[in-house]
Amino acid sequence: MKKSHILILLTIVLIGFGACEKDDICIDGDTPLLIIRFYDVDNPTELKDVTDFRIVGVGQNTTVTTVSDRTDTDSIAIPLKVTENTTGFYFISNSSDVETTDSSGETITVEGGDLDTLYFNYSRIDKFVSRACGYIANYEDLTSDLKTETDNWIKDIEIVTPLVENSTAAHVKIYH
């Protein structure tokens, strides 16, 4: 009788361990960032820093976390939305805080600098990576749409690679 209990217990333990899934670790399961390089409009082969650059997502109150805020930079890596086919950003050159007075006489701080609004349009492709990583989004048919204003600091945009499937090379060139 005791041997049958041990045999049943051993069988349950073996079945229990056999039913466990392998504990996978996700190594390459990141959705790629959009890589943008900034170039001199007068010398299109030369990279050119954007001074005191700030980038904020349209409809957001905070800066994009993948880009150092108010820094001089010639390249950035930004995330695109994985649930929509368009992502908008405020690209701000010479960003600064400007204090002003509102209609009630209260002092408020507003964004100063040259602000251009830029939208990226794309089609999403969900790609299965692994059981541990699940799906990531890749983007294809990338296009840009710069909101035209009286004095845009962004002069031209070139889509270098309309397929965004990695974060290793520039996808977009912006001339200023």
Image (tube, rainbow, N blue to C red):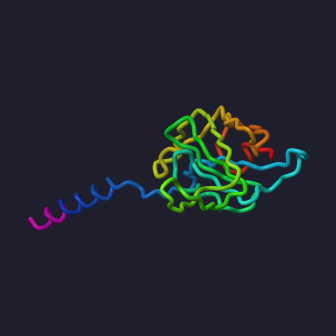
Q: Nearer the viewer, residue 167 or 152?
A: 152
Q: Nearer the viewer, residue 91 or 174?
A: 91
Which residue lies at the image location 72% right of the left edge and 43% below the top edge?
171
Percent of width and height locating residue 51? 76, 58
Q: Nearer the viewer, residue 153 or 62?
A: 153
Percent of width and height locating residue 41? 85, 44
Magenta-colored stretch includes residue 4: yes
Percent of width and height locating residue 73? 75, 58
Classify residue 175 as left or right of residue 128. right
Percent of width and height locating residue 34? 66, 46
Magenta-colored stretch includes residue 59: no
Image-quadrant location for residue 44: top right
Which residue lies at the image location 66% right of the left edge and 56% below the top edge?
112
Considering every residue shown, the one lying at the far right of the view is 43
Q: Nearer the viewer, residue 92 or 133?
A: 92
Report the quarter where the N terminus lies. bottom left
Image-quadrant location for residue 158: top right
**Dominant secondary-structure state across the stretch colored magenta:** helix
Magenta-highlighted residues: 1-7
Which residue lies at the image location 72% right of the left edge and 57% below the top edge?
94
Considering every residue shown, the one lying at the far bottom of the view is 2
Q: How many marks?
A: 0
Which residue lies at the image location 19% right of the left edge and 62% below the top edge?
9
Query: Where is 41 relative to 54, above or below?
Result: above
